[in-house]
């Protein structure tokens, strides 16, 4: 079964709380103040045996055109157009307001199944507002409490009754290629092109993240504007990219809130938005750190890149607003500066792009695909140890207190990111500088640029350790 439900209503009636309740996770930011949600956010909803796409929207407000509230309203109207069913939510404790009546007319013109939900109806405080809801003309309102999970059984029955049968029919079984079930040949990669590639776009406020994603999607899917900090929730959108060989690749893009220096973040809502952005980084496979090309490599940019490297994600640096710079000499200087300032991910792609004009989008997408393949790469043990033997013969590890450190061999434990294990004696005394020397050598030899590399050391157990000396 596959259908879409949009949650519509004025600000602070509990739409995001209901969204979180139906997706089973705290995906949308929730706060007591009105107007927290700005973009429309989608999630996979579940209610008993029903599976559907649920859209959380900004609160509907009457404002002049051209301001942020008007652009938020346009996003909400796009969600109404996309949906197969509408949840029109009111606050049962407040009752029906003039704004509720005004926007009820807008929802009614959509000519789609509408369920009227009187939220915050727990206890007797919502009784008056519940009875007022009958005057909106949407039939019997459903008393629910998104916060406490009350009324979901009645909501399930109402969805079943209101949705056309074709939307509730079970999907056909997916065919499986049985030859691949027992295919255990190692192909040197953990890449699975059947799954959507998860890409998070992060950066400082007003770097142009939402504008760039809108350009990639070819529509005004995400709320944008000259004001800094418009994006609050981490919004995910799915699309398909056409690769150089003509094949299609599914991708899932995450737009995130701008990350400022921690000491400058005092507002509770901004703290929640920053935490949501960090969750998107941990969930992603490739993270695009978007810089403002006119003021690149600020201290906060370096902090964000370091965070991405510590999380072990593949990295691409995007120089947005390149239409304002457009200087190839400057580009080469910025790439050299990136390697100097960020040695932990040396060789990462630094791609000029413009979300406003679309300049450089093809190279930008190609860089993401390429670094994702590198992040999934596995290197055979034989190739690793032939390289290791030549390196140690030319530059052996230094002796420590007269004892020679002996590295016997190494292997790759896993990919995503590449993680190597070296075996030998006295490895606990191996200097950090020599570890960096090995990592840089592997990065150059095996083309592991733009991804963090992990090294673990293993030593044989000393049979005499812990014994008392006679």
Image (cartoon, rainbow, N blue to C red):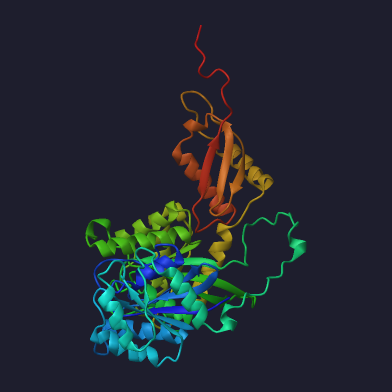
Report the quarter where the N terminus lies. bottom right
The one of 214 and 232 positioned closer to us in this rendering:
232
Determine the image quadrant of residue 207: bottom left
Q: Residue at x 58, y 82 (%)?
A: 165
In this orientation, does residue 298 appear?
Answer: no
| Relative vertical location of residue 346 with respect to residue 221 in this rendering, above or below | above
Question: Residue 455's x, y, as percent?
Answer: 52, 43
Residue closer to the observer: 286 or 379: 286
Q: Is residue 171 left or right of residue 287?
A: right
Q: Residue reaching furthest top?
A: 470
Q: Residue furthest bottom?
A: 109
Q: Is residue 432 above or below residue 217?
A: above
Q: Residue at x 60, y 75 (%)?
A: 243
**Where is residue 312 shown, x and y percent of the image?**
48, 53
Q: Residue at x 52, y 68 (%)?
A: 367
Asked if 4 appears above or below 344 in the picture, the reply is: below
How many marks can you see? 0
Spot occupied by residue 249 in the image (x, y as percentages of width and height): 59, 73
Quadrant in the rendering for residue 59:
bottom left
Q: Is residue 272 visible?
A: yes
Say which of 320 and 183 sits in front: 183
Give the camera-side residue of 278 and 122.
122
At 45% from the left and 41% from the top, the residue drawn is 433
Horizontal and vertical percent position of residue 337: 39, 60
């Amino acid at each position: 079964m596959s259908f879409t439900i949009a949650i519509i209503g004025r600000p602070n009636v509990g739409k995001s709380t209901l969204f979180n309740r139906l997706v089973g996770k705290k995906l949308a930011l929730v706060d007591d103040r009105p107007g927290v949600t700005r973009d429309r956010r989608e999630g996979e909803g579940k209610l008993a045996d029903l599976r559907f796409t649920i859209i959380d929207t900004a609160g509907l407000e009457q404002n002049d055109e051209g301001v942020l509230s008007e652009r938020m309203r346009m996003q909400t109207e796009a969600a109404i157009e996309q949906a197969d069913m509408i949840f029109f939510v009111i606050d049962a404790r407040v009752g029906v307001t003039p704004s509720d009546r005004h926007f009820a007319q807008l929802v009614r013109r959509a000519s789609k199944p509408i369920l009227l939900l009187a939220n915050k109806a727990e206890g007797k405080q919502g009784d008056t507002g519940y009875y007022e809801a009958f005057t909106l003309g949407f039939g019997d309102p459903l008393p629910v409490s998104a916060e406490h999970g009350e009324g979901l059984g009645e909501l399930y029955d109402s969805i079943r009754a209101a949705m056309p049968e074709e939307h509730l029919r079970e999907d056909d079984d997916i065919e499986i290629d049985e030859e691949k079930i027992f295919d255990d040949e190692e192909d040197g990669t953990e890449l699975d092109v059947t799954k959507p590639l998860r890409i998070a776009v992060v950066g400082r406020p007003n770097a142009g993240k939402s504008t760039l994603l809108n350009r990639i999607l070819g529509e005004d899917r995400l709320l944008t504007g000259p004001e800094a900090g418009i994006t609050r929730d981490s919004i995910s959108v799915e699309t398909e990219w056409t690769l150089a060989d003509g094949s299609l690749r599914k991708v899932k893009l995450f737009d995130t809130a701008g990350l400022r220096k921690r000491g400058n973040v005092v507002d509770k809502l901004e703290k929640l938005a920053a935490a949501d952005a960090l969750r998107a980084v941990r969930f992603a496979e490739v993270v695009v750190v978007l810089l403002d090309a006119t003021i690149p490599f600020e201290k906060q940019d370096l902090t964000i890149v370091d965070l991405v490297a510590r999380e072990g994600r593949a990295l691409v640096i995007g120089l947005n607003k390149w239409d304002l710079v457009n200087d190839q000499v400057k580009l080469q200087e910025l790439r050299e500066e990136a390697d100097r300032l960020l040695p932990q991910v040396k060789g990462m792609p630094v791609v000029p792009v413009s979300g406003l004009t679309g300049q450089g989008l093809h190279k930008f997408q190609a860089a993401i695909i390429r670094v994702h393949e590198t992040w999934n790469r596995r290197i055979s043990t034989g190739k690793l140890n032939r390289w290791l033997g030549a390196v140690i013969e030319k530059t052996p590890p230094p002796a420590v207190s007269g004892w020679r450190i002996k590295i016997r061999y190494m292997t790759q434990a896993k990919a995503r990111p590449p993680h190597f294990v070296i075996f030998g004696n006295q490895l606990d005394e191996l200097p950090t500088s020599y570890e960096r020397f090995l990592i840089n050598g592997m990065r150059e030899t095996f083309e592991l640029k733009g991804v963090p590399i992990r090294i673990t050391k293993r030593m044989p157990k000393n049979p005499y350790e812990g014994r008392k000396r006679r």
